[in-house]
Image (cartoon, helix red, strand yellow):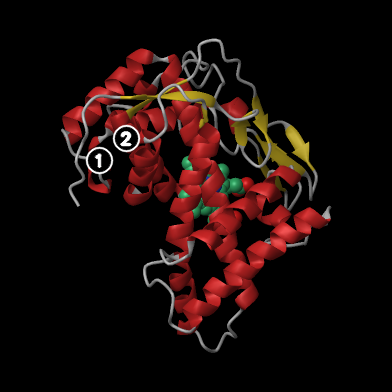
């Protein structure tokens, strides 16, 4: 995470000040690289990393569902692949992932990657036949679920910070206090209380997964509504998180809701879902978002024009329509990396 964020900051330093940049695109590239390195290993070549990212991006542009696994064809029931372009991008992703898995199986992969963990888990139970397709699907699901969501969170965080200068200044002050003139590391994350609160409040106002879909196994009473067996139930964090009886001034950006031990009422705040299908990447995603925010905010202000009108749209995740056009303003001082 640190290395990839620092690479982004270094690249941004070479962009002339005032050049328009799409923050959503930048954050998607950053989180794709982080998850690609974590899932597939650091030795995934640049070409393969780019092909996986492009493949998923073109896939996402062509599908419009909320169940990532199902519509990628990695969950129960294959979707109908609607166009040759879509089929091509999926089979390209499959080919690259298969190659990575094969490398791991023959002992050539990065030992710190998630694929390596999956391969080892499979190998520990030789009585179960090694299921390459399942392995590929798990790796791909983690990639897809872990990349878009964090990119969307960071993009919305930049938007909210640019509209609340007093919070942005407090974020800069906190990073200065905790890290001095060295680049934030993963060990600083527990001390970056405001940065974490900014991310949590961003997830409240703009939950990357704004609708959760469930199906009743049996006939149920949900409140005073009778749901028949097999009914589709939609839980909408987008609405829940903005309910006035649960959150004071629900439409306001107030990170202090999450500071000093304050937490929302149980089940009123579910950006990572809840229950048996809670997001398994919760800690990874939160840590990643806080660390990326701190590393970038230490060196840059991400400025959204005051005239910019933003429209949220829900595709696989909740994102600003057309991305988020910003300019980058270099902050003074060059911090040093400790490692
Ligand atoms: C801020 C970032 C993230 C948010 C807001 C988020 C949110 C969610 C939500 C709401 C679900 C449940 C969807 C449903 O039940 O319909 C989910 C599932 C999932 N997430 Fe995340 N996620 C984030 C980051 C990550 C990361 C970084 C990873 C991987 C490292 C990840 C891996 C997964 C996986 C594999 C599932 C499917 C679990 C299952 O089907 O049981 N997520 N995520």
Q: Dot 1: within a 10 Å radius of its alpha carbon, few (fewer than 14), some, or many (20 or more) residues? A: many
| Residue 64 in the image: above or below residue 129 | above
| Residue 152 in the image: above or below residue 283 | above
Q: Residue at x 50, y 32 (%)?
A: 155
| Residue 117 in the image: above or below residue 297 | below
Q: Residue furthest bottom?
A: 127
Q: Say whether residue 213 is left or right of residue 14.
A: right
Q: Dot 2: within a 10 Å radius of its alpha carbon, few (fewer than 14), some, or many (20 or more) residues? A: many
Which secondary structure, mark 2? helix
Q: Residue at x 57, y 65 (%)?
A: 138
Image coords of residue 259 (percent x, y):
31, 27
Instruction: Identify residue for label 2.
Output: 294
Image coords of residue 112 (percent x, y):
37, 68
On residue 82, the disc is none
Q: Residue at x 53, y 72 (%)?
A: 100
Q: Is mark 1 within 8 Å of ligand 1?
A: no
Q: Say whether residue 291 is left or right of residue 310.
A: left
Image coords of residue 246 (percent x, y):
51, 22
Q: Say whether residue 191 is left or right of residue 294.
A: left
Q: Is residue 217 visible?
A: yes
Which residue is nearer to you in this view: 106 or 203? Answer: 106
Instruction: Identify residue for label 1.
Output: 184
Q: Say whether residue 242 is left or right of residue 217.
A: left
Q: Is residue 273 visible?
A: no
Which residue is nearer to you in this view: 6 or 208? Answer: 6
- Quick check: marks 2 and 1 in contact, CB under 8 Å? yes
Which secondary structure, mark 1? loop
The numbered mark, 2 or 1, whose residue comes first in the sequence reads 1
């Amino acid at each position: 995470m640190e290395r990839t964020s620092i690479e982004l900051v270094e690249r941004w330093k070479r962009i002339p000040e005032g050049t328009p940049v799409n923050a959503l695109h930048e954050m998607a590239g950053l989180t794709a690289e982080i998850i690609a390195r974590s899932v597939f290993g650091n030795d995934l070549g640049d070409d393969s990393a780019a092909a996986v990212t492009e493949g998923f991006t073109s896939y996402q542009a062509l599908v419009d569902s909320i169940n990532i696994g199902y519509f990628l064809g990695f969950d129960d029931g294959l979707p109908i692949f609607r166009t040759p372009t879509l089929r091509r991008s999926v089979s390209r992703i499959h080919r690259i992932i298969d190659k990575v898995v094969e490398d791991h199986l023959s002992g050539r992969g990065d030992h710190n990657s998630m694929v390596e963990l999956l391969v080892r888990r499979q190998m520990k139970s030789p009585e179960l036949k090694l299921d390459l397709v399942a392995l590929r699907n798990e790796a791909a699901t983690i990639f897809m679920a872990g990349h878009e969501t964090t990119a969307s969170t960071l993009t919305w965080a930049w938007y909210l910070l640019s509209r609340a200068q007093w919070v942005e200044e407090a974020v800069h002050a906190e990073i200065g206090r905790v890290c001095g003139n060295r680049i934030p590391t993963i060990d600083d994350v527990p001390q970056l209380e405001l940065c974490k609160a900014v991310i949590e409040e961003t997830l409240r106002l703009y939950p990357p997964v704004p609708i959760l879909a469930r199906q009743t196994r049996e006939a149920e009473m949900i409140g005073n509504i009778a749901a028949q067996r097999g009914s589709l139930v939609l839980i909408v964090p987008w609405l829940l998180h903005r309910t006035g009886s649960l959150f004071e001034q629900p439409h306001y950006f107030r990170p202090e809701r999450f500071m000093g031990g304050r937490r929302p009422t149980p089940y009123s705040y579910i950006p990572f879902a809840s229950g048996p299908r809670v997001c398994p990447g919760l800690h990874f995603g939160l840590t990643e978002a806080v660390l990326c925010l701190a590393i970038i905010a230490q060196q840059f202000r991400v400025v959204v024009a005051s005239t910019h009108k933003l429209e949220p749209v829900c595709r696989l995740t909740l994102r600003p329509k057309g991305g988020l056009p910003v300019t980058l303003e270099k902050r003074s001082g060059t911090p040093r990396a400790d490692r």
